[in-house]
Image: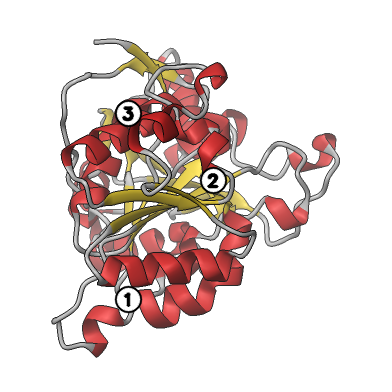
Amino acid sequence: MPLMSYLGAIGAAQREAMESDGDVIIIGEDVEANVYGTTGGKSRSDRGDFLTIFGPDRIRNTPISEEAIVGVAAGAAMTGLRPIVDLSYSSFMYLAFDQLVNQIAKNRYMFGGQASIPLVIRSAMFYGLSTGAHHSDRPYPMLMNVPGLKIITPVSPSDAKGLLRTAIDLDDPVICFEACPLWSMKEDVSDEEYRIPLGVAKTVVEGTDVTIVAISGAVPHALKAANELREEGVSVELIDPRTMVPLDCGTILNSVTKTGRLVIADPAHRTCGAAAEISAIVAERAFDALKAPIVRITTPDTQIPFAPVLEQQLYPNATKIKTAMRRVLQH
């Protein structure tokens, strides 16, 4: 298996899909020369590779108008194509909310199941890089509240490739939220075609004392905390949901039933967030198994500052997660 970066795995998934299905196209700003379009594992010097292979009819540059990009993708999907939309910064998605929430998400329902919108929207979360309040949002919790959308948050290169291939195959709209700090992560990834089903969480580490559910970019921090606590004799079970919609409630509930303790690490904001939803599910369905209160480690409800020294204090990290797990272990 070749060593592949997260972005390389995304590129490999897109290339495989385009080679196997002539209806798959890529739409977005500057995609002709964008690093996301490179062949899996290649460097920035290979930008434009997809354009050479598939041509300008399938690699479509667009004006700088997110509403237009998503609207074009919706129409293309309704008429038989399978667009992959590159929206770059996830904060830009707000400009396309009418198309996304009112049209794409409601399409199948409004047409009584006679129409489908097989499209994927890739959206990068650039938080932690001093990009300021307008470019640092992590809006997947907002869209978890919209029926009709599927949401994936791959963490590893292998998961990114497998989940994206599944998303491209589906006849429903899928939003892929990619945490930019993960883009440089590398691991061995199969060069064969494979798919990972949506709605199946990954148990990254098995344990018996406390469950930590970590979302997107919080997973590496939770893994570091789990490994450090293991050296102290604490058995931590780490779960990466991988897909927020559909959410694998069964894996989370089974883990909490086993450990009796739950900590949730989520880099999105606290109020009405993914961590709040998971907390509610466990409180409703596994309350009797809890030995301690549920603890959430999230970004506080504040705008993101430019200054790195201020910004880095906001997000979940290994120290915060370890402190939370030690707290619940006292019960």
The residue beneath circle 3 is: 12
**Could you say which disc has been placed on residue 124 in the image?**
2
| Residue type marked 1 | Pro
Residue for point 71% across, 36% down: 129
Mark 1 crowd level (few <14, some 14–19, many ≥20, 10 Å Cα): few
**Could you say which disc has been placed on residue 147 in the image?**
1
**What's the distance in space between the residues labelled 3 and 1, CA to CA?**
30 Å
x and y percentages locating residue 11 in the rendered image: 38, 31
| Residue type marked 2 | Ala
Residue for point 47% across, 32% down: 222
Foreground of the two, 314 or 119: 119
Mark 2 crowd level (few <14, some 14–19, many ≥20, 10 Å Cα): many
Residue 197 against residue 104 in the figure, above or below:
above
**What's the distance in space between the residues labelled 3 and 2, CA to CA?**
17 Å
The C terminus is located in which quarter? top left
The label nearer to you, 3 versus 2, is 3
Q: Secondary structure at mark 1?
A: loop
- Report whether 9 appears left or right of 185: left
x and y percentages locating residue 154 in the rendered image: 37, 40
The label nearer to you, 1 versus 2, is 2
